[in-house]
């Protein structure tokens, strides 16, 4: 069993030791980057800039199948303009997964549900995650597909930088 406050205190103590603050009660700010969706590319600068062991990454993941189905049905709703006219609106989940063109049309739906591989690797194609449009998205997607082994290796490497990764549900 993990106690998150204890994990954060331990990281703050590690930072205190690496910065030379000797008094255990000395006030030391503990920065917090809290986000509902993350991509390791957002966290990497912290791991590079901060002293080793001072960043306490914590991630909570959903069951990948439940995550996919949830996002699939969310994307099908009429108020989701980004899926208007796409086959995701007409296909059931399993048929959607078996149609390569439909998958490419609605990339975010299935890539988000990859159990965090793209998120941990830092190459997610997602609005607000560093992509600069259709061309950048295509470059990142091709790189992920062509370098699957490297993407998985990088995801595992980054996963081990977290002090806690939990599963919801």
Image (cartoon, rainbow, N blue to C red):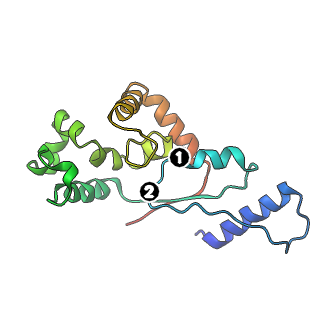
Q: Decide if residue 133 is on the left or right side of residue 1.
A: left
Secondary structure beneath dot 1 equals: helix
Q: Nearer the viewer, residue 102 or 163?
A: 102
- Which residue appears at 38% of the width and 59% of the height? 62
Tell me, yes or no, whether the two marked residues, 1 and 2, touch with CB atoms within 8 Å. no
Give residue 134's position: percent from left, percent from top. 32, 35
Task: Provide the residue designation for mark 1.
Answer: 40
Q: Decide if residue 108 is on the left or right side of residue 51.
A: left
Q: Is 139 located above or below residue 80 in the figure? A: above
Q: Decide if residue 30 is on the left or right side of residue 99.
A: right
Farthest residue, direction left: 90
Farthest residue, direction front: 132
Q: Decide if residue 57 is on the left or right side of residue 84.
A: right
Task: Provide the residue designation for mark 2.
Answer: 37
Alpha-carbon neighbours of circle 1 within 10 Å: few (<14), some, or many (≥20)?
many
- Which residue appears at 16% of the width and 59% of the height? 77
Q: Nearer the viewer, residue 5 or 28?
A: 28
Which label is found at residue 96?
Answer: none
Name the quarter where the N terminus is drawn. Answer: bottom right
* Alpha carbon distance from label 1 to label 2: 10 Å
Give residue 41's position: percent from left, percent from top. 53, 44
- Which residue appears at 37% of the width and 48% of the height? 127
Name the quarter where the C terminus is drawn. Answer: bottom left
Alpha-carbon neighbours of circle 2 within 10 Å: few (<14), some, or many (≥20)?
few
Secondary structure beneath dot 2 equals: loop
Give residue 96's position: percent from left, percent from top. 16, 44
| Number of marks drawn | 2
């Amino acid at each position: 069993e993990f106690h998150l406050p204890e994990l954060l205190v331990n990281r703050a103590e590690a930072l205190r030791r690496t910065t030379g603050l000797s008094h255990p009660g000395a006030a030391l700010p503990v920065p917090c980057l809290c986000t509902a969706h993350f991509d390791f590319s957002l966290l990497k600068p912290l791991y590079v800039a901060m002293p080793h062991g001072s960043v306490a990454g914590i991630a909570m993941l959903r069951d990948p199948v439940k995550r996919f189905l949830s996002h699939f049905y969310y994307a099908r709703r009429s108020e989701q303009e980004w899926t208007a006219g796409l086959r995701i609106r007409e296909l059931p989940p399993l048929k959607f997964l078996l149609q390569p063109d439909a998958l490419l049309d609605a990339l975010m739906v299935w890539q988000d549900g990859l159990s965090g591989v793209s998120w941990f690797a830092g190459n997610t194609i997602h609005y607000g995650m560093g992509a600069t449009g259709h061309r950048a998205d295509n470059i990142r997607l091709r790189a992920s597909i062509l370098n699957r082994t490297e993407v998985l290796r990088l995801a595992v490497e980054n996963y081990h930088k977290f002090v806690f990764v939990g599963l919801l549900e």
